[in-house]
Image: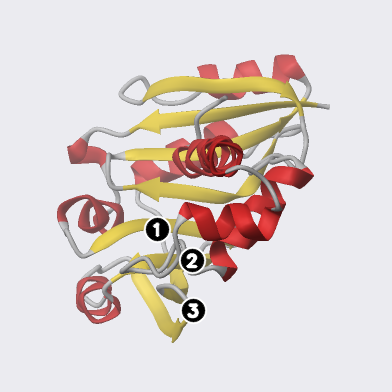
Amino acid sequence: MHAARVALQIPTEHLHPMHQFVCESPAIDRETILERDASGEVTTLLLHVAGDRRGYERAIEEVPQVEEWTTTAAAEGFYVYVRTRLRTREQQYREALDRDAVLVVPPVELRSDRTVRQTLVGPSDALSAAIDALPGYIDVEVLRTGTYDRSRGVRVSERQREALAAAWNAGYYEVPREGDIEAVAGALDCASSTASDLLRRAERQVVAATLDEST
């Protein structure tokens, strides 16, 4: 089973109004599609949005294609349940990817840099055909390809995980910081330089996963 992680660069004039709002509003970081049902004329979405809930609600209220929506608070950001009709440009985009033998695996990230990042799964020739069928105005960057692995994400060793847990418990990641590297080293029963190295290596994996970069 093949997988391709792709970043689609959407021109400003082709952005969906809510993705454009994410790009333009400093109070919104990203919008993520968690679930999608596009089987009928109206597409139903479950989203997670990181940012200002009230500002987002004011913006979505002005989008004529949106027929129904509601928001719910989350631990970080908020969830959005929305039913919307797609414009012709979104339909073209969906038709390219929603084809036999190709699955778009959530989450799908709509980022403030005008990119849509998502994972496609299926036979390699079908994935290539789906990418080739995207409208010409969309620039496609293939971030990585390979065998699909749902567990892909933050990968740290057991010792690095112990270091992160020790740092968390020591208040090392509090703002302002409550514990220092010596406290982390004491909890791990190792030298401060060793604790620092473990944390740097673990943090690099966390940052890479957050930015969707390879390590």
The three-letter amino acid code for the residue at tag 3 is Ala
Q: Nearer the viewer, residue 91 or 10?
A: 10
What residue appears at the point 19 percent right and 38 percent down from the top-left corner?
12
Q: Is residue 148 above or below residue 183?
A: above
Q: CA distance from mark 1 to mark 2?
A: 7 Å
In the image, which is nearer the foreground, mark 1 or mark 3? 3
Of labels 1 and 3, earlier in sequence is 1
Residue 75: image tag: 3
Residue placed under numbered mark 2 in the picture: 47
Residue placed under numbered mark 1 in the picture: 31
* Label 3 packing within 10 angstroms: few (<14), some (14-19), many (20+): few
Q: Nearer the viewer, residue 184 or 83?
A: 184
Residue 185 location in percent, x, y?
A: 60, 52
The three-letter amino acid code for the residue at tag 1 is Glu
Q: Are marks 1 and 3 in contact (CB under 8 Å)?
A: no
Going by the image, does 103 lie left or right of 200? right
Which quadrant of the structure image shows residue 155?
top right
Disc 3 element: loop
Q: Nearer the viewer, residue 99 or 155?
A: 155
Q: CA distance from mark 2 to mark 3?
A: 14 Å
